[in-house]
Image (cartoon, rainbow, N blue to C red):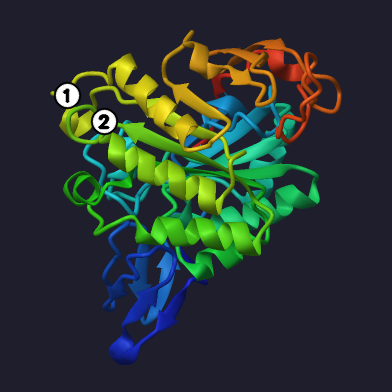
Amino acid sequence: MAKEAELYQRLAEGRVRCTACARYCNIPQDKIGFCGIRQNLKGKLHLLVYGKITASHVDPIEKKPLTHYMPGTKIFSISTTGCSWSCAYCQNYDMSQRRIVEGADVTPEQIVRLTEQYGCRSIAYTYNEPTIFLEFAHDVGVLARNKGLHNAFVSNGYATPEAVKMMSDFLDAITVDFKGNGETNFLRRNVGIPDAGPIYQTLLDLKKNTNVHIEITDLIVPEIGDNLQEARKLSRWIYDNLGPDTATHFLRFHPDYKLSHLPWTPIETLERHHDVARAEGLKYVYIGNAPGHPFENTYCAGCGSVVVKRYGFDIAGWYMDKDNNCLNCGERIPIVGTLSQSADDNRFFAVTLNH
């Protein structure tokens, strides 16, 4: 159903200015913003997908990826339609680029109840960009927090100070997903934004004004989004502004949507990105979408021993004590939470909602 949004300003002549994302769409009456789900109705901005869910799934939290937060737990993932970006490679383009408002009708209470019913410790707002349906995520998230559940965003980070302030009411963790190392020409040609400036600002606001756990991902697209100098600059920025303990993931691209003609990212390219980030001082650097690769594992920054052995989204070995200290040298590993007893459960299945 449509519900009046909170993240907007009224302008002259019945126009509104949306403040959910850094596009700051100036929307005339009866028109819809870039994302496809925020509409000006009689001079008031409405969220058209409030309670409209297109996908619901139980996932391993490592799939987000969040490797340093509540390891081995199940997370209940939900999405709507629409997006603030127009990525040419989007694997979820059927949802993110869909401009028809549809989905199963659910209430915040139902989402929280389903999360508990399936033994999930947290809720992920994911698959499409959550900042564009932030008012609904907020209402779900506040209820969830009151029930002792956690909330996580998988986000492009293209937000606003107003959005970050709303996130601070309920958000516990976020994966901010750079693309092509955040290189300007790549973003302009393949994402549809001018530059990565608002992403950096969102991260600074989150770091300064909230206690949200932050992890960084970076989709490395071969031939057009794999510049190592840009990776070096991004890694240095993470080191300087978020700290050397920030988990950073370089993700393997697979052909999809409008970039189906490109190959998979070569493993060697990902390894070079990993090495650059480590050389810039980042301690916990991962390669994603490459099951079985050694750089899926977590290594102790003190002695280099494997402290978490991984295969894909599964945890195959845990070599820390109850306080997350390395069993070999005693180094404290900056992971929030200890290994969950649900780590060996089936943590990957769809949940059908009634339309």
Seen from this angle, which residue lies furthest bottom?
A: 12
Q: Which mark is residue 262?
A: 1
Graded by Cα atoms within 10 Å as few (under 14), some (14 to 19) or many (20 or more), the crowding at tag 1 reads some
Left or right? Give the position of 175 relative to 290.
right
Can residue 135 be seen here? The reply is no
- Viewer-proximal residue, 281 or 105? 281
Left or right? Give the position of 294 relative to 233.
right
Can residue 165 be seen here? The reply is yes
Reply above or below: 216 against 296.
below
Reply above or below: 345 against 261.
above
Q: Which mark is residue 221?
A: 2
Seen at 57% across and 53% down, the residue is: 137
**Could you say where residue 148 lies in the image, as x and y percent from the top left?**
80, 44
- Viewer-proximal residue, 218 or 170? 218
**Could you say where residue 145 lies in the image, as x and y percent from the top left?**
75, 50
For the image, the number of numbered tags is: 2
